[in-house]
Amino acid sequence: MKQLLILSGKGGTGKTTIASAFIKLSVAKAYADCDVDAPNLHLIMAQNSEPERTDYFGMPKAEIDVDKCIECGLCKENCRFDAISDENGFKVDSFACEGCGVCEAVCPADAVSLKPAVAGELMLYADNNKVFSTAQLKMGSGTSGKLVTEVKKQMKTAASADTKLAIIDGSPGIGCPVIASLSGVNMVLIVAEPSISGISDMERIIKTAETFRTKIGVCINKHDTNSANTEKIEEFCKEKGLPFTGRIPFDPEAVKAINNGQTIVDVDCPSGSAVKEVFNSTMKLLFKESDGAET
Amino acid sequence: MAMKSKGVKIAILSGKGGTGKTLVSVNLASIAEKSVYIDCDVEEPNGHLFFKPEKVREEIISVKIPVINESLCNGCRKCVEFCKFNALAFIKNKPYVFEEVCHSCGGCMLLCPEKAIGEQEKPIGKVQEGVSGNVSVHTGIMNTGEASGIPIIKNLLNESILDKELPVFVDCPPGSACIVMESIKDADYCILVAEPTVFGVHNLSMVYDLVRLFKKPHGVVLNKCLDGENPAETFCMENNIPILGRIPFDNELGTLNSDAKIAARESKRYKALFSSLLETVMKEVRHETTVNPQR
């Protein structure tokens, strides 16, 4: 199974719009939404069945037993995350607690214990021989990278053996969920936006992806909103030797399609036709033998 | 009763990326007579691209990583068993530290019976401070390849910067995970920026839950407004969320913004729009601080 990950660095460049179009065009049997912090793919890939839901346990959280606590303050003193307060007795702020266990280890009265904590929910849709793995991180939770790993694992486990292609919608940024998304994929398609901000973010996500030595392709969304910046991006790709897989125009029809729960290839619109070309060149790149000309 | 309006801290967030957090933060900070702008989107900081600050001072931000003195290590593996993040291993009679997954809790050093573990600084990024006209510009930049920028955000929001009598505009990262929480923790007021798509509404509802969880007074700015139905506006009406202002979808603004120009400094029309938005926001803030004076 070849895995294609769609990333952008900057949010709002069109990752989910393009991922959903790719899923439709490829009739992919496996797909996943790794933006566990703000998942959206399920809003557009309408499902016929209810998902199978599983609680996701992140890191455990510390709890202080007030009856045993002797108020020595060692836990607060040693906590590096400012997670323990001593107003009206010693208490753990479960949002700040990272579950490291230092407080439990230093407590002389055995008053601290680590308790498992639900940090989100995994969802698996499986119908018509297709699997769609997604999740929602609980508000204010950390450990999003770990949940991303679970989403990908869930997709791989559920996908049938003859699945040739999996499409993964990534999250914005360059931090832990993105790093977790990158591990093990065959190629990254970066959706760039022709703005100064977009270019800066694209350069940072490319640097991040390069440390994984993953194959990288770049496409530009809303290319006609700033043609000077579009040229800059294409020039940048040429200089870096990064394959460029096409341009998609800004298209008000795209917003309408998305708001109707459709992908941009479900309706006849300029962005839909453009994304087909991006899809074809991306697939060529993905399925090209890795010992070929690109190395 | 003292009215807090000068040193007020306003966080700008959105859930979904690319809705216009930076646009709103940068322009509000520019319109205010004198202000502080803090870019907490340390994975993809963009505010400095707009402000192009001068006289930039820089500080490297580091975290503490364990270093093991092998000659003192007796191979008891207490540290390995303790580490909840699997950042330590004992392989072939040698201890190893995996820096990327270490959370810098300090537990291993604390527990080592042989005192064989010390700590060293590991840079994960930097903070910059500069001036752009009336605005003091603070930017956090995480190094590519790092997992968490939270220590950088903590440094950015350090009280010493914020004690000034100036309004502070905090540009938050996308999403609603721990990193966003850290950014809004000390805010007096939250501005939620929403775009008129079903994706936008879904992610708006998540940050709406987040600001309610933290009991932060809040209001919404509707960005990229087009003619016709606005699902984000409908959401605000249904939930009685104050709408602070509307920013139209417009080519002039789009071009200025994609060229990293500050619309309020370039165009009279946008100067007027953001001035009236700032006035509305400040009115809301004053109202909230008199209603909830404990803040």
Image (cartoon, helix red, strand yellow):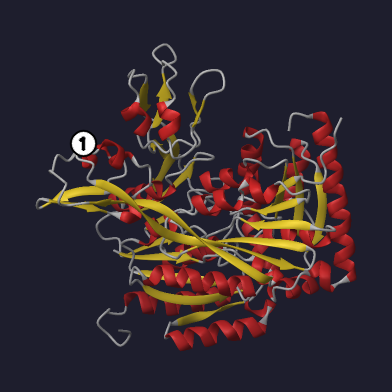
Observer-nearest residue: A272 or A205?
A205
Q: Residue at x 56, y 72 (%)?
A: A200
Residue B189 in which image quadrant: top right
Report which residue position mark 1 lands on. Answer: B113
Left or right of B129, for residue A177: left
Q: Residue at x 58, y 84 (%)?
A: A232
Q: Is residue B93 above or below residue A275?
A: above
Left or right of A173, for residue B211: right
Residue B147 on image: x %, y %:
42, 55
Left or right of A82, for residue A224: right
Q: Residue at x 57, y 47 (%)?
A: B180
Residue A72 in which image quadrant: top left
Q: Is residue A80 above or below residue B50?
A: above
The answer to whether residue B201 of the structure is visible from this angle is no
Dot 1: element: loop
Amino acid type at image mark 1: Pro
Q: Residue at x 75, y 47 (%)?
A: B220
| Chain letter of the residue beneath label 1 in the structure image | B
Observer-nearest residue: A187 or A99?
A99
Residue B283 on image: x %, y %:
87, 43
Where's the C terminus of chain B, which quadrant? top right
Decide: few, some or many residues near mark 1? Use Cα within 10 Å; few <14, some 14-19, many ≥20: some
Observer-nearest residue: A207 or A274?
A207
Residue A216 on image: x %, y %:
40, 75
